[in-house]
Image (spheres, rainbow, N blue to C red):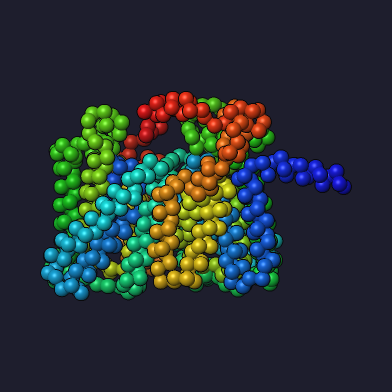
Amino acid sequence: MQVLISTVVLGTVYAVLALGFSLIWGAARIVNMAYTSFYMLAAYFFYVFYSPAHLNIFVSAILAVLAASLIGVMTYKFLLEPIRFHEIVVVLVSISLAFFFEEIILSIFGIVFRRVPPFIPGYRELFGVRVLNQHFLAFGVGILLIVGLWLFLSKSKTGIAIRATSQDREIVNVMGISEKKVSLIAMSIGIGFVTISSVIVSPIYVVEPLMWLHPIIMVLACVVLGGLGSLKGSFIAAYLLAFSEVAVVNWLPNGAFIKSAVALLVMVVVLSIKPEGLFGAFFEEERL
Amino acid sequence: MRYYLRRFYKTVEGEVLVIPGRTMGAIGILFLFFVGFLNISGHLKNVLTLCTIFALFAASWDLLFFSGQLNLGHGAFFGASAYTSAILSSKLGLPIWMTIPLGALTGVVIGVVVAIPALRLRGPYLAIVTLAVPVILQGIVFLFPDFTGGELGLFGLSPISESPTFRYHLCLVIMLICVGIMWKLTDSRSRMIRTGIIFSAIREDEVSARTSGINTVRYKILAFALSGFFAGIAGGLYAHTMKVVGPSTLEFLFSIYPLIWTVFGGSWTIYGPVVGAYLLYFLSMQLLVIVPEIRMALFTAIIIVMILFMPEGITRWIRDKIEIRCPRCKVINTRRRKSCRICEAPLQLTREEKERKKEIAF
């Protein structure tokens, strides 16, 4: 039961992160390795606003989301957009950015584990297991974000423009949609997702300068396992990977060391059998 | 005797001195040999040795990238080989001239194993699957702590040599030989070795390569095996230079470093990663001395600014500044020349041609 609840919470977090990532990949065609460093930044902003600055917890959460998202969008606008078509250079610059943020945080705060208080303290009994209220909140907000994104993409005009951009960039430009603007919007939504989930989740886990490294690997794994560009695929893959991680940690001795190894092994096996991911369409040659 | 000397001089003059890029390369190599004899501190010599090893490592990454396979888990080859060398050396007590080749063979094995899923994957899928390989290997290392030393790693390996100067020169010679082989293998203009042109064909368009009768499966496995072999040599040298091998060699960062060096130096050139590794590793080590607190932040900031300034990489940027390829006979010329040194074809565009080119661009 404990495993199931942890899986659901962790899976929701991964799903939110993976959806934001695949949104960015689809619309802007960049592999943004600095993606989860905004997760770390938001958590640290939250900590700063709450603890040394003594703001209200909700105010500090909102401020943290805004500040981290602003930084994320600025980095995209000024650093990543000019070199968007050199694929490998984007990877290089975004990884460098991630290390840059990590070092800045490390030199300010040091390698100390910090804790942020939960929004709703206390716990509830569910099937004989104590579940923190923050877990419920994380799950609820995650599902809300996912449903909201799904509605946005399928109903609103901007959402349809994003989907069109991820299918064919040239035709989108011909149809009078500014591909640059759509990329920026998708980027903002993706960064917003990552920062919101960070603020919700950081009370459950610890806040530390290296907290971006593990999520980015798992997010990449989720996105690829589900099939690039398939939101449903990344959603299911997130739960699958979260389950394999949690199960390994709980059921195997020494599990904490090899949890990502086992999760990634699952991914490699699935991809060897089905190279296009769980729900991905197989492009023989992609037109760029 | 004098005849041979003159012939050697003529060859050097005809092949190296007329091309500024090659002249710079030759001067650089001579300088690297010369630095070893200078009376500098042992620490600096160790840094230079590591630079040499990492240059080989980065060049082997570029060999794989040359054939279009983006590998985010290159540390797997390096780490597996380093661990093999370490286990063979510390548990079985084998000498160095056996452990390093056997480590390189492990690199080949890992390369072929990775190549099997890689054959069906491409682009981001391949990158992520390769990213998983070192993480899985790290899991294996943690599972068998008795054999691999677990989190602490293995230590007490026999060094390559007691003298840091000899160690540096040995690594330099091995690196130059390996990079030279790789450079020849990826030479697309060579008539004798066809791998260069086949690898670049696979990189540019795999389907077309297959339709023109190239067995892409075989060549991709070959690319992975070669890359694993050279990365394995680098791993073995690293193990015996550091005298300790820990799970850090399988970390994410270690797989990212060759990418950073290669893209910074100029990808698909083989000599680019060498230059990038020397510059960046040396820079990061010097920053560690000058400003230890913010060294990584400053280092990454420098990388970002430089790469925004020259996204093609530093060697290509310099090469385009000083060299021009003759449009008719494809021979490399100095940028300053007005006509080609072989076929006398005009190199610089006339004003009319420049204007026409501008119009086409619009």
Q: Residue at x 40, y 54 (%)?
A: B304
Q: Say which quadrant the C terminus of chain A sits in.
A: top left
Position of A131 with respect to B345 (left or right) is: left
Measured from the top left, where is residue A112 in percent x and y? Answer: 32, 74
Q: Residue at x 17, y 51 (%)?
A: A145
Q: Say which quadrant the N terminus of chain A sits in.
A: bottom left
In this view, the residue in front, B227 or B135, is: B227
How many labels sit on residues?
Answer: 0
Position above or below: A160 against B284: above
Position of A95 with respect to A197 (left or right) is: right
Position above or below: B314 against A176: below
Position above or below: A32 against A45: above
User: In the figure, residue A54 lies in which quadrant?
Assistant: bottom left
Measured from the top left, where is residue A51 in percent x and y? Answer: 19, 73
| Residue with the most extreme front position | B351
| Residue with the most extreme right position | B1
User: In the figure, residue A204 lies in which quadrant?
Assistant: bottom left
In this view, the residue in front, B57 or B212, is: B57
Position above or below: A120 against A143: below
Q: Residue at x 31, y 50 (%)?
A: A78
Q: Residue at x 77, y 45 (%)?
A: B9
Residue B239 in sight here: no
Position of B46 with respect to A142 (left or right) is: right
In this view, the residue in front, B67 or A224, is: B67
Residue B358 in sight here: yes
Position of A48 with respect to B181 (left or right) is: left
Measured from the top left, where is residue A241 in percent x and y? Answer: 32, 54
User: In the figure, residue B136 lies in which quadrant?
Assistant: bottom left
